[in-house]
Amino acid sequence: MVLAALVQRISAALVVFATLRFGMVAYGVELTDAYQALLIIGTLLALLLFPGSGSSELQVRPRFWTTAISTLWSWCVLFAVLLAFGYATKTSALFSRRLLLSWAVVAPVAILFVRMAIDGLMTKISRLRTPKRRVVIAGVNENARSLASKIENNPHLGLSLDGHFDDRSRERLGGVPEERLLGKLVELPGYVRANRIDLIYIALPMRNIQRVTELLDELHDTTASIYYVPDVFVFDLIQCRTDEIVGTPVVALCETPFYGPRGVIKRVSDFVFALSILILITPILVLIALAIKLTTPGSVLFKQRRYGLDGREITVYKFRTMYVSEDGSKVRQATRDDERVTPVGAFLRRYSLDELPQFINVLQGRMSVVGPRPHAVAHNEEYRRLIKGYMVRHKVSPGLTGLAQVRGHRGETATVEEMRQRVESDLEYLRNWSLELDIRIIFRTVGMMFKDKKAY
């Protein structure tokens, strides 16, 4: 719900402000210009970074843990941005270390507590709606069954389902209780008028649009609200949502998950994470560069053209691990015991250390930390003709790691089917993106670095 999302964002911002201000009072810290700026910037970042709901599209854990992980991740990004800002402006010495540490621990716990309390309160308020609005559904199909199930299993919606109307016989409509099948479509208007129905959901297939039009004409002399439930789910949807263009309603069938605030959250988290990692691993990067330069002739970095966001061509950086640098119309994939791989390169590829320069690509905005892995341009041109939906994976920036990689779909793709499995995981990532999913992929990637048998 939009109201609930707005309340959650505002509450998170208020908690961020209140916990810092309370900490200042508790530690006897004066409200200087620096602390005023910290209060304002922290509150604004909280409004921007904290999601409006703790739920996740990929609901694999109880709601509390989903909300807790989402809250902790948003807070880590917020705090990292503040630390980076303080470092860049050389103002970090103006703040009490003890106060900041206490704030870093107390604030996310307080935000989680308030978010769960508001969530519970909103649920209770919605359940108090009386009387419940009566609902009927025109049609019996997968969409209609799904809608009916959600109405019956979510009492906080304040809806009461009377049943379905459909022209087919009961024998052909398996899965619908006899008492829920109320009659033929022609009987729907009369039933609505006689029983003071509040809501009508028309869930007839798009191919029966003429029948939908006729039904709308027949229902216009009732006071019921009418909704059409399009069967767009017959398509392979990516981030399906509704929108409008100057009053004209449209339905997104294939869209990036990173529109609006989600895109800002993704970019900020990518930038902070990449910058932090690069600062930490700079000595390692220098040692790897020296090892490559001293053992084989040629450049330290290998640059290759890949497809990035929206299929635009980008240049991706890697440590050179081969004697050759292929980037033409034909690019041969690396295989086990590949004679082109240098001794140092074999070690780098075994532990995926050759990918570390791509954190620079992340800072440039060409890549993301998590997303579909970019393929060579030659491979893209080959597989886009062989695999349905292949180019849809470019609706987001390519990543250093992704859902396909942590599932084992990495390295050499000897068959089209192996590449198809990788693409299916990439599209699943686009459908179900959440910050929680990104965090899980990052942790699983770290765990796989030392035991991935496909790294060669």
Image: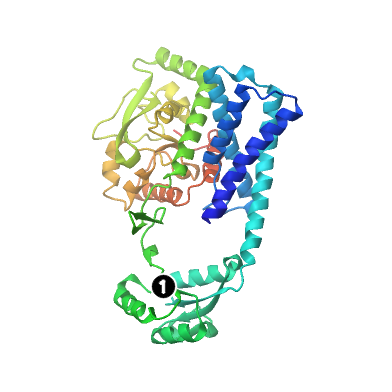
Q: Is residue 343 left or right of residue 80?
A: left
Residue 206 position within the rendered picture, expressed as x and y whole percent measured from the top left: 33, 70
Amino acid residing under circle 1:
Ala
Badge 1 is on which residue? 203
Please state the total of marks drawn on the protein image: 1
- Indicate whether 92 appears above or below 123: above
Report the residue at 52% width, 17% height from top. 283
- Indicate whether 66 appears above or below 159: above
Residue 454 position within the rendered picture, expressed as x and y whole percent measured from the top left: 46, 38
Report the residue at 64% width, 62% height from top. 125
Report the residue at 32% width, 32% height from top. 314
Report the residue at 37% width, 32% height from top. 366
Residue 222 position within the rendered picture, expressed as x and y whole percent measured from the top left: 42, 80
Q: Secondary structure at mark 1?
A: loop
- Indicate whether 253 appears above or below 258: below
Q: Quadrant of residue 71?
A: top right
Q: Quadrant of residue 297?
A: top left
- Indicate whether 173 appears above or below 340: below
Residue 162 position within the rendered picture, expressed as x and y whole percent measured from the top left: 53, 80
Q: Is residue 192 left or right of residue 231?
A: right
Question: The C terminus lies in which quarter of the figure?
Answer: top left
Label 1 neighbourhood size at 10 Å, few (<14), some (14-19), many (20+)?
Answer: many
Report whether residue 323 is seen: yes
Which colour style is shown? rainbow
Given residues 341 and 319, the one toward you in this image is 319
Q: Is residue 288 left or right of residue 83?
A: left
Given residues 171 and 450, the one toward you in this image is 171
Report whether residue 370 is seen: no
Given residues 1 and 236, the one toward you in this image is 1
Kindly give the residue lying farthest to the left in the view shown. Answer: 329
